[in-house]
Image: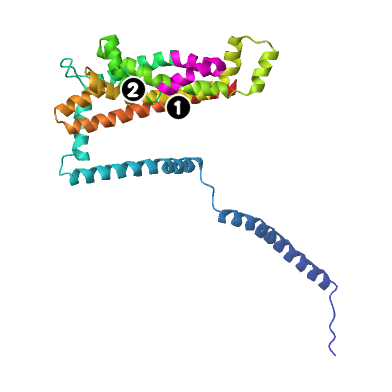
Amino acid sequence: MNTHTLSPNAPLQAHESVESVAEVALPLAGHAAHAAPAATASARPRAPSKLVLRMQELVKSAVPPLLGLALLVLAWAGVSMATGGSIPAPGATWEQAIKLFSDPFYSNGPNDQGVGWNVLASLERVAIGFGLAALVGIPAGFLIGRFKFLSKMFNPIISLLKPVSPLAWLPIGLLVFKGANPAAIWTIFICSIWPMVINTAIGVQRVPQDYMNVARVLNLSEWKIATKILLPSVLPYMLTGVRLAVGTAWLVIVAAEMLTGGVGIGFWVWDEWNNLNVMNIIIAIGVIGIVGLALELLLVQIAKAFTYEEVKS
């Protein structure tokens, strides 16, 4: 009879085998638990870097203007083909522009100067006329906006003279000043002053009445009211008037120089028309637009700087 005898060590060996399996399984399970989040993290799309975001913003801001310019060039080329070359093509005009701007400051006499001298002469007239208009128009706007009596007194005059075409004042300037250059400056002055007067006066009139009541309680002088209360509130309106005025001044100087002659971008356009040089006229149109845009951007940056300093203070 065969009897099975159990070894006293058998249960101990089974127990040891379970422990050995647990020792192997638990680290594997822990490794799998740590690996799962890593795998999930690697599967998530990475956020674009700052450089990529900036490039995307640059593309979004640059593509629409480039498309607009491309459309303009295509329309220009179509008009050139439709007119049989009477309007020069973009390619030929570009080549002529390169020749002109290779030496923009040549001078062969008063009636034969480079485009650079003509632009500088026009800018000089605009600066003088515009500066005089600012010296007169901004203080006048403060006074008209501050005092109701002056407002009622000058509003009819402004309403009467503001719609008059600036070129209508040119003969008056020629009659009074006896010269083309001061007459052109006078025309710039008279067309630039109205936007500054009107916008400054509106800004003063829109100052909250509570501010003026506080000024009365504190018994502030008119100078302190103007510098401490009115000027910070009126500044945005005043800068808007300045921007409108300089744009109008640059438009008017071209037309005034066509009529008065001499040196200037307007005279240069008229002189090229007398020579039937349409290509140079188109180039001059581009120069006038670029200079006007540069003046506008310059004033926008100045306005932002003043506004930032005002907010900071």
Chain-order first, disc 2 or disc 1? 2
Residue 287 in view of the camera: yes
**Real-space Cα separation, disc 2 to disc 1, in angstroms:** 25 Å
Q: Which quadrant of the rendered structure holds the N terminus? A: bottom right
90 drawn magenta: no
Q: Type of residue at label 2?
A: Pro
Secondary structure of residue under mark 2: helix
Q: Is residue 147 left or right of residue 69?
A: right
Q: Residue 8's x, y, as percent?
A: 86, 73
Residue 104 visible to the viewer: no
Q: Quarter-wise, where is residue 17 in the image?
A: bottom right
Q: Are marks 2 and 1 in contact (CB under 8 Å)?
A: no
Residue at label 2? 166
Q: At x 20% / y 35%, what residue is drawn? A: 93
Say which of 114 and 7 sits in front: 114
222 relative to 192 in the view: left or right: right
Coloring applied to the structure: rainbow
Q: Which residues are magenta?
A: 136-160
Tell me, yes or no, whether the highlighted magenta stretch contains residue 159: yes
Residue that label 1 marks: 300
Quadrant location, the C terminus: top right
Q: Can you say whether 45 is above or below 126 in the image?
A: below
Residue neighbourhood size for the residue with mark 1, other residues' Cα within 10 Å, grouped as few (<14), some (14–19), many (≥20): some
Residue drawn 25% across the image and 42% down it = 76
Foreground label between 2 and 1: 2
Callout 1: helix, strand or loop?
helix
Label 2 crowd bin: few (<14), some (14–19), many (20+), radius 10 Å: many
Q: In this image, 4 relative to 227: left or right?
A: right
Q: Position of residue 158 (x, y in %)?
A: 44, 20
Q: Main secondary structure of the magenta part?
A: helix
The image quarter containing residue 162 is top left
Residue 13 lies left or right of residue 249; in this view the side is right
